[in-house]
Image (tube, grey):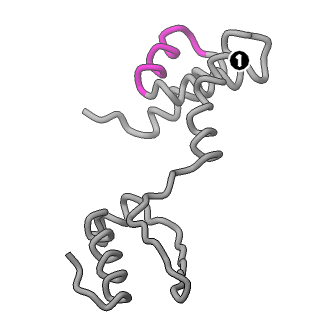
Amino acid sequence: MAIPAIVKRRLLLKATFGGGPVVHVLAFAVQPMVYLKRMSMRRGILGPSRAWRYMAVVAYAPGSMKKLFGREPDIIATETLRPPQFVNVLTATPLSRKEQKRTGITRKKLERQALADVAAAKGVEPD
């Protein structure tokens, strides 16, 4: 049985701004990461508690690191160029997984298409 969103929101608000121990346990049980982030921000960053401050670092570090460093690009192919040849590089923002699923794009399809484009540019048949 799913818990309605309004109930989750009310539990988290009550736990953030007071509430008894039962409210804290229920809020943690419903959405543990959201509860930990809220409490660590309120009691650690804005409050005096060192333990909650360390919890804030642990809770917010993965998202911050991902935003800072992002995803690594995939190497599809490498080619050696000779003097009369050149490289034309095009970039685009990567599709999200949801968009990839919706359009039916897979990594294998992209690799095959890239290799076919390289082979067509060379004038040979792809493997």
Q: What is the x, y in percent for residue 93?
A: 53, 68
Q: Is residue 15 above or below residue 114?
A: above
Instruction: Give the quadrant of the C terminus.
Output: bottom left
Question: In front: 68, or 45?
Answer: 68
Q: What is the x, y in percent for residue 34?
A: 53, 30
Q: Which residue is depicted at the point 51% across and 51% down?
A: 71
**How packed is label 1: few (under 14 Cα within 10 Å), some, or many (20 or more)?**
many
Instruction: Spot the residue most to the left.
Output: 127
Question: In front: 75, or 12?
Answer: 75
Q: Quadrant of residue 60?
A: top right
Instruction: Spot the residue most to the front.
Output: 83
Q: Quadrant of residue 2?
A: top left
Q: Which residue is depicted at the point 27% across and 87% down?
A: 124
Q: Which residues are magenta?
A: 19-30
Instruction: Give the quadrant of the N terminus.
Output: top left
- Please indicate whether residue 35 sits to the left or right of residue 45 in the image: left
Total number of numbered labels? 1
Q: What is the x, y in percent for residue 98?
A: 36, 60
Q: Is residue 42 magenta?
A: no
Q: Which residue is depicted at the point 31% across and 83% down?
A: 119
Q: Is residue 91 above or below residue 3?
A: below
Q: What is the x, y in percent for residue 67?
A: 61, 47
Numbered disc 1: secondary structure: helix
Name the magenta segment's main secondary structure. helix
- Please indicate whether residue 30 sits to the left or right of residue 62 in the image: left
Q: Is residue 74 above or below residue 16?
A: below
Q: Which residue is mark 1?
A: 53
- Please indicate whether residue 90 sits to the left or right of residue 108 in the image: right
Q: Amino acid at mark 1?
A: Arg
